[in-house]
Amino acid sequence: MFLRLFRRHRGFTLIELLVVIAIIAVLIGLLLPAVQKVREAAARMKCSAQIKQLSLAAHNYASTYDSKLPPGQNTSNMNAGAYANTLSSLLPFLEQEALYKAGISGNGSIYFWDANVPGANPPQVRCQPVKVFQCPSDSTLSGGWSSAQVGGWMGSSYAANWQLFGQGQGTNSARYGIGNIPDGSSGTIGFVEMLSACASAGNLWSHPWQTDWGPLYGYAQGNYQLPPQIQPFPATGASAVCDQDRASTGHSGGCQVGMMDGSVRTVTAAVSPTTWWIAVVPDDGLVLPPDW
């Protein structure tokens, strides 16, 4: 008589299964913040690189136009391409020459933002996305559109300094050139982060007007003098805490700004309003304080 030995195979008990699930949940909880930090670091790096591109594009513009800087709003040409703003004027120096040519063609409209782009649907310049104007941490962008103008205007996560580019605007130049900024290029902000939608307004890359909707910052004193808002969420809607007059960012560590020497720096919420405004105004003759 042979005895057969049977090895009994058993599965996990319910308690063991729950323990494994709990361990996995703990590991995910530990890893998720690290993954989010890596993702935000990558977004910040990309955003910084794009701001630097804008500053360098301004330098290249100046090299082409006898050291002059692009205007905040070009009102001199009313035949075609009227009211092109600073970002619009920089398009040829951001590998977007075809879009720029469409804007100044007068095809469908004399206004830059409303001219038609051949083969595009919708055709208007204002409906065309420009990746270099979009920060990955700007949650107010919706498929490239400003969430305040979906289907109408593509948004921008950046704005040009009106105090620098908007003063004394002319045919193709602002008041100051790249080589004669009174406070120096290293002490003057050229570009700031600004959410594409904020409160009841937005930041639209091709919009011509300097207030509410245009990609221009620092039009006058008042709230423009206040330092940047760091993650002012919710940014839109009835409970919005976002101030459309202030620079704003989706990054947690601070707002990145492009100086006119081509450098990019992060400005935290600790900077004083006085220091911030000194960096914005190009001709106040003041030295940046230590908190800069």
Image (tube, helix red, strand yellow):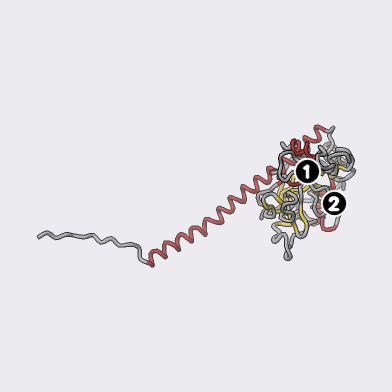
- At a point 77% along the width and 59% down the height, the residue shown is 200
Name the element at disc 1: helix
Relative to 5, residue 278 above or below? above
- Nearest to the observer: residue 59 or residue 124: 124
Q: Amino acid at mark 1?
A: Leu
- At a point 72% along the width and 46% down the height, the residue shown is 122
Name the element at disc 2: loop
Q: Amino acid at mark 2?
A: Tyr
Q: Quadrant of residue 98?
A: top right
Identify the residue under disc 1: 87
- Nearest to the observer: residue 148 or residue 105: 105
- Nearest to the observer: residue 118 or residue 228: 118
Give the x, y percent position of residue 243. Answer: 77, 59
Identify the residue under disc 2: 219
- At a point 65% along the width and 45% down the height, the residue shown is 46
Residues at marks 1 and 2 touching, judged by CB atoms closer than 8 Å: no
Q: CA distance from mark 1 to mark 2?
A: 16 Å
Relative to 96, residue 247 above or below? below
